[in-house]
Image (cartoon, rainbow, N blue to C red):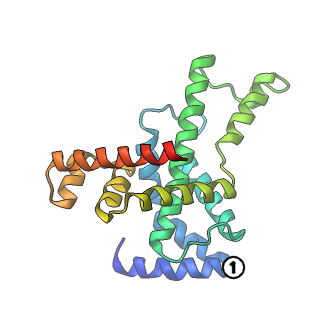
Amino acid sequence: MNRQNVESVTIWLNQFKEGQTDAVQPLWNAYFTKMVTLARTKLGTAPRVALDEEDVVASAFFSFCEGVKDGRFPKLDSRDDLWSILFTIVVAKSASHARFEGRQKRGSGKVIHASSTEGDNSAADLLADLASLEPTADEAAIMVEDLKALLDGLGDSILQKVAIWKMDGYTNREIANLLNKSEPTIERKLKIIRETWKRTKASD
């Protein structure tokens, strides 16, 4: 994203928060490719039968827009806040989609389409599963706050960057290159992150 787009994102974001729905399209255009890349990374080798990465991204962006309109993201003042929210929702929906496809594979070995099983219990189950792919705006806001709390709990900006890059699909080598560090150093930092988050989870 070039400097002009970076500055424009803040303007579009503020316009959307103020109720100017015309700002939604440029925000979508600015982040579509980045969100699709993230979704594709998170979906990995999961089958693309019911939904693909673009469907996941469209669903995530819709949840984001609904959350903004309902005022569920109080900490949304910059492009960094925006990406944090989009990142969290895309990751959550990608994980839900992968679990859904896994359940279908373990069941009949193929996805049962609701249109071909009208009146059948399996159709209702499928619709229920599809609904579970849609975290509500409230749930998305909670996930964002949970992620921010975990990152804040690391207490170190470098550890926070490593955690975000790792969740974003970067390899240890790529992170090492970004920080001009060795791979063993990155591995040690990831170990610290995992141990810190385990302690946080144990204390909840």
Q: Residue 174: x, y in percent? A: 23, 51
* Amino acid under disc 1: Gly
Q: Quadrant of the N terminus?
A: bottom left
Q: Is residue 55 left or right of residue 70?
A: left
In the image, 155 versus 164, the foreground residue is 155
Residue 4 visible in the displayed image: yes
Q: Residue 72: x, y in percent? A: 67, 66
Residue 67 picture quarter: bottom right
Residue 68 picture quarter: bottom right
Q: Residue 29: x, y in percent? A: 50, 67
Q: Residue at x 63, y 16 (%)?
A: 108
Residue 4 picture quarter: bottom left
In the image, 17 versus 81, the foreground residue is 81
Q: Which residue is under mark 1? A: 19
In the image, 29 versus 172, the foreground residue is 172
Q: Residue at x 49, y 42 (%)?
A: 202
Q: Is residue 91 above or below residue 178?
A: above
